Structures are given as structure tokens and as C-alpha cells.
Image: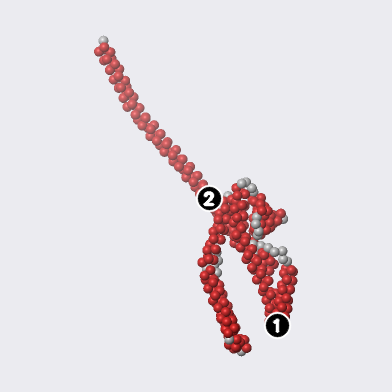
Amino acid sequence: MFGLDLTMLLIVLLAAVSAALVAYALLFSRLETEKKAGARLTRVKAAESDLGKAKAARDRVQELSKRRKSLQDSLKDLEKKQEEKNKYIGDNSLKSRLSQTGLPVTMGRFYAMSVGLGFLASLVALIVGMPLLASLGAGFVFAFGFPRWVIGFLIKRRRNKFLEEFPNALDVMVRSIKSGLPLNDAIRLIAADGREPVKREFQRVVESQKIGLSVPEACARMLQTMPLSEVSFFSIVIAIQSQAGGNLSEALGNLGKVLRERRKMKAKVSALSMEAKASAVIIGALPFIVATLVYLTSPQYMMILFTDPRGHIIMLVSGVWMSIGILVMRNMINFEI
């Protein structure tokens, strides 16, 4: 009985295996076809996905190209406008230079002070006993030369103070913008709590906004009283941000770093050229020092240059050559950054 059940079980098992083999043989081609179709479908979907990614990448590249072209066009327009403005901004007229000193001096007051100073110098020269022609020359120098030299000195000192404080003001603006303040409030913050002369320049920007100018136009007008390349960079950054958008705090932060690096480079160049400047000063002053010492020891030996016409010609030629040498040395040690 047990042997019969085992035989039946084997027969059933063989029948099941045979049926499975027959079904597999019949369905093999269909399964293989479905497998190949699924593989092709997967490849098609992957290809479509790749095409979509490639199209998205092309769209991004085209968008970046359009944005870059728009930014380049904006820069070109700004450069053209800046060149047009530079014809009228920061010129060398006396009125413009007076405004760059930061002092409340009008043209009339300046001319009155210059004439008074020249008259005083001539009077002192006459009292001392100098000849009339020499007294008039001294008055002319103190009326026209000395006041303008003082203006140049004040302008240079004010510009140096501005360049020293301007990066700190940009850092304050960056922190203000990152904290959520708009650009106008950041500018007003510098105008209220900044240090001179940056404070006064930003006050002019705020005053320009009150009369209806936009922020880029008001910042560009800063060049009237502070015609520096650093101020031009600042106005260009503000103008680009207003037209093309972007992260203003990051742009101003980068500008502040650039200005600090420029200042470090200027200091380094000044230190490296100090030896050449000292040599130029010594060489330029040496003829006058030698002439003075010779006059103190042997006055008659030097007075012939002042009494004889040939001595006048020698001094004139020597002065011309000295001026040429000083100009050449000045150009050799003067570095623009």
C-alpha cells in the first residue's frame, strides 16, 4: 500500500513537472518578447529622461547666456553714461576743487582771501627791504600760487581720510542689508552715524534723493565732490544691482575687500618707492645746499652769478635742466594703482 502511494506521488510529480515544462516551452517566446519590450521601454524612458535633462541644461545655459549678455549690455550702457558724466563731474575748475575740500568757502570769499594774502605778502616784503619787483612777485605767488597749493593739500588729505573710512562704511552697509534693512535705510545710517568725510558724502546722497533722484543717480553724483575710482566702483555696483538684480550685500562685501587690497597695495608701493623718493629729494636739493654753503664761505665767488649777465644765463639754463631732471625723477617714482 505504501509502495503504491509512493508510485502515485512520483507519477503526479512527474506530470506536474512535465506540464510546467510544456507551459514554459509554450510561453517562453511570449515571456522573452515581453522582457525585451520592457527593456526597450526602460531604455526609451531613460532616453526621454536624458533628453529632458539635456533640454533643461540647455535652457539653463541659454538663460545664463541671456543674463550674461544683459549684464554686459548694462555695463556698456553704464560705461557710456559714466564717460559722459565724467566730462562734467570732478573737473579741475576752481569751484569744483573748492567743493572737494569740504570747507564752506565760496568763490567770492576765496578770491577775497587770496587778494588779501597777496597784498599782505607784498607789504611785508617791502617792509623787510626787498625791491619793488621782488615784492610784487611775492604778492603774486601768495595770491595765486599758495592758496591753490593749500586747496590741493586739503583735497589730498580729505581723499586719504575718505579712502581709509570708506571700506568700513561698506561693511556697515553689508551688515545692515543682511539684517533686513533696505538700501535707502543703510545709506541713511551711514549719513547719520558715519565718520567724516564719508558721513558728509552720504548726507549729500540722502539730500539728492530728497530732491527726486534715484539711489544710483544720487550715488553717481558723489563723484562731483569725491572724484575717485573707488567711488565710481561703488556707484557702478549700485547701478548694476538696480538694473540686473543680484545679491547686493555680497557685491558690496566684495567691493570692500577690493578697496582694502588696493589700499594695502598702495601702501606697499609707497614703502618700496620711499628710497627712490628720498634719493630724488637729496639730488634735487643738493645744488641749492652746495650753492648756499659756497655763498656762506666765499660770497664773492657766488655773487658773480647774480651780477654778471653770463651768470644769469647759466642760472637760467641750470634751472631748466634741474626742472627737467626733477620731472623725470617724479615720473619714475610715481606709480598709479
Q: Nearer the viewer, residue 224 or 187?
A: 187
Q: Left or right? Give the position of 295 relative to 130.
A: left
Q: Which mark is residue 268?
A: none
Which x, y percent locates residue 41? 42, 36
Q: Residue furthest front?
A: 297
Q: Nearer the viewer, residue 45 or 183?
A: 183
Q: Which mark is residue 129?
A: 1
Residue 308 quadrant: bottom right
Label 1 neighbour load within 10 Å: few <14, some 14-19, many 20+: few
Which residue position holds label 2?
64
Residue under the image location 61 percent in, 63 percent down: 160
Residue under the image location 62 percent in, 52 percent down: 173
Per the image, label 1 sits on a secondary structure element best described as loop
Per the image, label 2 sits on a secondary structure element best described as helix
Residue 313 is at least partly visible in this image? no
- Against 229, residue 285 (above or below) is below
Label 2 neighbour load within 10 Å: few <14, some 14-19, many 20+: few
Q: Nearer the viewer, residue 329 or 280?
A: 280
Residue type pointed to by label 1 = Gly
Render colour scheme: secondary structure
C-alpha gap between disc 2 and disc 1: 78 Å
Which x, y percent locates residue 129? 70, 82
The quadrant in which the N terminus is found is top left
Residue under the image location 67 percent in, 54 percent down: 191
Eye-nearest disc, 2 or 1: 1
Which x, y percent locates residue 157? 63, 65
